Structure formats: C-alpha cells, structure tokens
Image (spheres, rainbow, N blue to C red):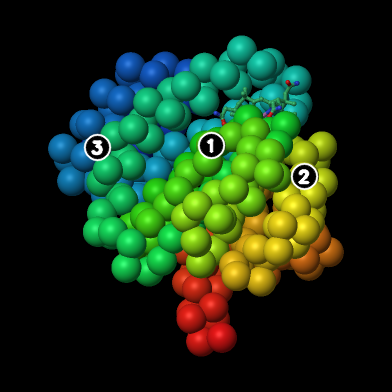
C-alpha cells in the first residue's frame, strides 16, 4: 500500500499536475489551498509551478507536447502567478533604485521575465516592465524617461539572443549606456554570451538576478 502523503506534498504534486496539463482553474484552487495550509508562496512557485513548466518544455522538445499544450500550460502558470505576485512583491517601493526590464524584440516569452520582476520588487527595486517584444529604441526611451540604475534584458530563444547585443548597441549609440548597468538572462543565455555582448552581469534565475542587480546597483552608486 502507498504511504499517505503529507498534505503539503500532496498539494504541491496536484499543483504541478494542473500546471503541466494546463488546468488553470484547478491550479488556482490548489494554489489557494496550499496557501491556506501554510505553504510559502516561494515553495509553491519553486517546488511546483516552475518544475511543471520545465517539464512542459521537455515534453515540447521530445515531441510529446505541441504549441497548444504549451500555451494552456503557460495560461495556467499566468493565472497562478497573479495570486503569487502580490504575496512576494512586498518590498515596499523604490528604495533600492529603478530597474527597466523587458523581453527583447521578436520574443514573446514573459513568464521568466515577470518572475525576475516580482523578485526585484520584493527586494525593494522599482520595476518598470516594458513587456515583451521590446524594440531597442523603446529601451533607450525608457532609460531617458525613468533614469534606471539597471536595465534588465531577457531573451528566451536562440533566434532572439542577437537582439540583446543590438539593444546594448542602441543604448551605446544613444549615449545612455554609461549611466546604467545592464543585466541579461533567459534560458539560452549564459555568462560567456553576456560578456560577448558587453553586458555588466548575467543571472541564470530570478533569485540570482536579485543578487546580481543588487551588486550592479551598489557598484553604480560607488562609481
Ligand atoms: Co516557447 N520555447 N516558444 N513558448 N517555451 C521555449 C523557450 C523552448 C526552450 C521550448 C523547447 O523547445 N524546449 C523553445 C526555445 C528553444 C530555443 O530557442 N533554444 C521555445 C520555442 C521554440 C518557442 C516557439 C518558437 C515555438 C513555435 O512557435 N514553434 C514560440 C516562439 C514565440 C516567440 O517568442 N516569438 C514559442 C512560444 C511559446 C508560448 C507562447 C506557447 C509560451 C510562452 C508563454 C509566455 O511566456 N507568456 C511558451 C512557453 C511556455 C515555453 C516554455 C515551455 C516555458 C517558458 C517558461 O516560462 N519557463 C519554454 C521551455 C522551458 O523554458 N523549459 C519554451 C519557466 C520560467 C520560469 O523559466 O523562462 O527560463 P525561464 O526564466 C528564468 C530564467 O531564464 C531567468 O529567470 C527566470 C526565472 O527563474 N531569467 C532571467 C529570465 N529572464 C531573466 C532576466 C535576467 C536574469 C535572469 O536579468 C534581466
């Protein structure tokens, strides 16, 4: 006979399954049940929601999932993130400085970028989120408008990675590059790529993004 699972683990398993299968309403219901049972928002996010999307990616890669499955899983993730976001982003304002954040041109993935935004807000940064498919000129405009300490660029496709370099080039050409620090991230991006395109920092995930952004902001203040 199977061992009975502790309530928290059963909730995490169910939430994982609902996101994996794109069952948005059931996912939200399980998420609420998890919170009511005392599970931390970060536990629900990092131990159920994100692993589920990782599995979606693996199934897409192996041909078991197609675009519709990926879309409905993303929709279930989004609905769940709407609940988690206010619980995690309670850093209380702009004390740490402003970060302009966006997914580069040609790329419409935003779940990972949004998570970085949530964590940065939670760490006390004011986040100006430009959304997805952001043209280099829009980043330049946002730097002029919001005077950020750090600009964060996300790219999730190998085909959109070159847009990271183009965006940094546009910041240089517009004469605003020296006022800001640039951090880059997204699944196909790595440290070597970040160095090649002239970024100041790279982070593999949202919590590392907070650490690196803090370091970059501290360096900017000391300069
Ligand atoms: Co897309 N997609 N997708 N997709 N999708 C990937 C990225 C892919 C890896 C799937 C796969 O094949 N395994 C693959 C890219 C392959 C590649 O180029 N290397 C892929 C593909 C091919 C595509 C299409 C081309 C499919 C098609 O049309 N044939 C298409 C492209 C559309 C476009 O952008 N032009 C496409 C479309 C979509 C959907 C619309 C269906 C949907 C997006 C929904 C949305 O975002 N609103 C989708 C999804 C859901 C995925 C997967 C399954 C999940 C992405 C995700 O949200 N992951 C993804 C596979 C995967 O990632 N396993 C995949 C969870 C998220 C928490 O992780 O995004 O890595 P991640 O973010 C992390 C880090 O990267 C980091 O922190 C985040 C949190 O920890 N990070 C930063 C992110 N930004 C950062 C910025 C920083 C620092 C760290 O500093 C500023």
> Where is residue 173 drawn, in percent x and y?
77, 58
Residue 198 falls in image quadrant: bottom right
Whether tag 2 and tag 3 are in contact, CB under 8 A, the answer is no
Residue under label 1: 131
> Can residue 171 be seen here?
yes
- Front residue of 23/222: it is 222
Of all residues shown, which one is farthest toward the bottom?
222
Residue 193 falls in image quadrant: bottom right
Residue under label 3: 34
> Where is residue 222 drawn, in percent x and y?
51, 87
> Can residue 194 be seen here?
no
Side of 42 relative to 37 (left or right): right
Question: Residue at coordinates 47% horizontally, 21% vertically from top-left?
Answer: 75
- Front residue of 158/13: it is 158
Question: Residue at coordinates 65% horizontally, 33% vertically from top-left?
Answer: 133
Label 3 to label 1: alpha-carbon separation: 29 Å
Which dot marks residue 221?
none
Q: Secondary structure at mark 3?
A: helix
Give the quarter of the figure containing the N terminus. top left
Q: Secondary structure at mark 2?
A: helix
Q: Secondary structure at mark 1?
A: loop
Of all residues shown, which one is farthest toward the top?
68
User: Which marked residue is nearer to the observer: mark 3 or mark 1?
Assistant: 1
The response on whether ligand 1 sits within 8 Å of label 1 is: no
- Front residue of 210/173: it is 173
Other-residue count near label 1 (Cα within 10 Å), few / some / many at <14 / 14–19 / ≥20: some
Residue under label 2: 163
Give the quarter of the figure containing the C terminus. bottom right
Query: Which one is earlier in the sequence, the residue at label 3 or at label 1?
Result: 3
Label 2 to label 1: alpha-carbon separation: 15 Å
User: Which marked residue is nearer to the observer: mark 2 or mark 3?
Assistant: 2
The response on whether ligand 1 sits within 8 Å of label 3 is: no
């Amino acid at each position: 006979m199977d061992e009975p699972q502790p309530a928290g683990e059963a909730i995490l398993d169910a939430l994982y399954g609902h996101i994996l299968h794109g069952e948005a309403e059931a996912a939200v219901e399980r998420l609420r049940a998890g919170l009511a049972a005392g599970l931390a928002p970060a536990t629900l996010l990092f131990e159920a929601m994100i692993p589920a999307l990782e599995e979606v990616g693996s199934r897409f890669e192996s041909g078991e999932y197609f675009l519709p499955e990926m879309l409905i899983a993303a929709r279930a993730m989004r609905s769940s993130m709407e609940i988690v976001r206010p619980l995690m982003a309670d850093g209380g304002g702009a004390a740490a400085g402003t970060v302009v954040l966006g997914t580069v041109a040609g790329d419409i993935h935003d779940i990972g970028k949004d998570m970085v935004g949530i964590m940065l807000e939670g760490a006390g940064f004011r986040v100006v989120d430009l959304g997805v498919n952001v043209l280099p000129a829009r980043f330049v405009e946002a730097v002029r408008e919001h005077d950020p300490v750090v600009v964060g660029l996300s790219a999730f496709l190998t085909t959109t990675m070159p847009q990271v370099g183009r965006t940094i080039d546009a910041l240089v050409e517009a004469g605003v590059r020296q006022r800001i620090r640039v951090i880059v991230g997204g699944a196909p991006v790595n440290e070597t790529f970040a160095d090649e395109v002239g970024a100041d920092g790279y982070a593999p995930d949202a919590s590392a993004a907070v650490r690196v952004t803090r370091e970059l902001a501290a360096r900017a203040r000391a300069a």
